[in-house]
Image: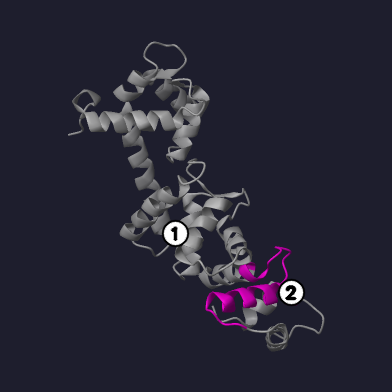
Amino acid sequence: MERSAQQASPAEIEKIKEHFRRHDSDHDGVISTQEFNVMLKRMGVLLSPSDEKRLFDAMDQDKSGKIELQEFIAHYHTILALEKRAEEKQIENLRQKTSFSVEEIQAMYANFKRIACTGKDDGLIDKHEFRQMMVESDANRNVVFYDALFRMFDRDNSGDIDFSEFVSALAVYHGKTAGIHSPDVRAKFFFGLYDANGDGFISQDDLYKILVDCLAANEVRINHADAQRLVETTFTLFTVPEGGRMDFNMFKTKAQM
């Protein structure tokens, strides 16, 4: 049975207060309707405007139009229950779309939340937070590779990665997408990594940058002439016309996904 706020220990009350302060973005001691909306989105709780208003009104016991700390404490377990339900729904949805297990997705969710709160703490991963995450796991790569990978995760080009995008991109990367179109999806993912400027083509310059970056990450040094020869040989193998660029169909035909 769920404990009420009145039964919470001093340590739990302090944790609730910290949660309140984190969502009181203008530090005026109350949570406004706008701050409440942002808070729910950060927690992955997506309600209709009418349901969100009903929840806000229920928490706003003195009808001041703001949620004060004591009101927040009194309804904290309701908020946690909504977050838990939203998390379970999203995990089940992603389990159906990928071949990750529930346990794997839960572990990703915990990691995602940890990364998403290192900067703006808005429940999303921005480019800076993404770079920090990549540096932690692979400090040898440079910004060119990280930014290309970020574009692959940020599928709606919003400038931020939500949890669904995070898991979907990892599913493609690890070959764990569900459905008959998985090979094409995987090919498009890796094509996008090499298409450094996102123009729909892989130029020799695009491939050169990624090649040098990948070799450097493995502590392999290569001079410009040798790297350029490798790029030109690759373009020949992919039957790219001399001086031309590689399109997706050329890439998909030759690449082993």
- The quadrant holding residue 242 is bottom right
CA–CA distance in space, label 1 to label 2: 35 Å
Magenta residues, start to end: 192-221
Outermost residue on the right side: it is 243
Residue 126 position within the rendered picture, expressed as x and y whole percent measured from the top left: 56, 49
Q: Residue at x 46, y 33 (%)?
A: 39
Q: Which residue type carries mark 1?
A: Lys
Secondary structure of the residue carrying numbered label 2: helix
Residue 152 position within the rendered picture, expressed as x and y whole percent measured from the top left: 58, 61
Which quarter of the rendered picture does the C terminus lie within? bottom right
- Residue 211 on the magenta segment: yes
Is 224 placed left or right of 147 in the picture? right
- The quadrant holding residue 253 is bottom right
Q: Which residue type carries mark 2?
A: Asp
Q: Which of these two is toward me, 150 or 247? A: 150
Q: Which mark is residue 97?
A: 1
Estimate how packed mark 1 is, as few (under 14), some (14 to 19) or many (20 or more) residues with alpha carbons within 10 Å: some
Residue 164 position within the rendered picture, expressed as x and y whole percent measured from the top left: 48, 52
Q: Which residue is mark 2?
A: 205
- Residue 37 on the magenta segment: no
Give the answer, above or below, for where 214 lies relative to 239.
above
Residue 178 in sight:
no
Secondary structure of the residue carrying numbered label 1: helix
